[in-house]
């Protein structure tokens, strides 16, 4: 099962509620949960806040999404984050903190 969907169900949220909390659309949530697309780095951070994830959980989620998808798209901020995290040997907590700092500073 997709990691975002698993977390959503564990939080007892439906897709509409998660979309609202994350400032996204239900269609976008569906695309991410079905593996049709990877979330942008900005959406990943929004989802991590909506699901009340720690930095470590957010970093773990990013890595899980990449592992599940098998996709490495150069234009994806998420794949760049995971790639940098791996090269720099960042912990999940450090990767999650980096993602949140990048979005806070307007980078993606």
Image (cartoon, helix red, strand yellow):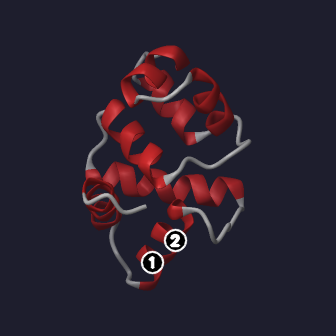
* Picture layout, residue 107 above or below residue 35: below
What whole-number distance in Å separates the C-alpha atoms at marks 1 and 2? Answer: 6 Å
The reply to whether callout 1 and callout 2 are in contact (CB within 8 Å) is: yes
Q: Which residue is mark 2?
A: 80
SS for tag 1? helix
Residue 82 point in image, percent of width and height? 49, 68
**In this image, 15 relative to 101: left or right?**
right
Residue at horizontal 66 percent and vertical 53 percent from the top: 68
| Side of 87 where 57 appears, left or right | left
Q: Quadrant of residue 11?
A: top left
Quadrant of the image containing the N terminus: top right
**Res 53 quadrant in image:** top left
Relative image position of residue 67 (x, y in whole percent) = 63, 60
Q: On the rendered image, what quadrant is the C terminus found in? A: bottom left
The residue at 47%/26% (across/down) is 8
**Toward which corner of the image does residue 74 lie, by quadrant?**
bottom right
Relative horizontal placement of residue 40, taking residue 47 as reference (left or right): right
- Is 70 placed above or below 39 here? below
Residue located at (37% from left, 46% from top): 45
Q: Which mark is residue 14?
A: none
Circle 1 Cα neighbour tier, 10 Å, few/some/many (<14 / 14–19 / ≥20): few
Residue, far front: 106
- Asked whether residue 21 is in view, the answer is yes
Outermost residue toward the bottom in this view:
87
Please tell me the numbered disc located at residue 84. Answer: 1
Residue 99, percent from left and from top: 35, 59
Q: Residues within 10 Å of mark 2 (few under 14, many from 20)?
A: some
Q: Give the structural element (helix, strand or loop) at label 2.
A: helix
């Amino acid at each position: 099962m997709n990691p975002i969907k698993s977390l959503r169900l564990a939080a007892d949220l439906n897709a509409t509620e998660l979309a609202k909390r994350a400032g996204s659309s239900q269609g976008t949530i569906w695309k991410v949960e079905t593996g049709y697309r990877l979330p942008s780095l900005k959406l990943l951070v929004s989802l991590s806040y909506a699901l009340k994830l720690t930095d470590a959980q957010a970093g773990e989620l990013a890595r899980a999404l990449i592992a599940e998808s098998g996709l490495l798209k150069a234009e994806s901020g998420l794949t760049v984050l995971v790639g940098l995290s791996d090269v720099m040997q960042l912990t999940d907590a450090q990767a999650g903190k980096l993602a949140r700092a990048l979005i806070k500073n307007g980078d993606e």
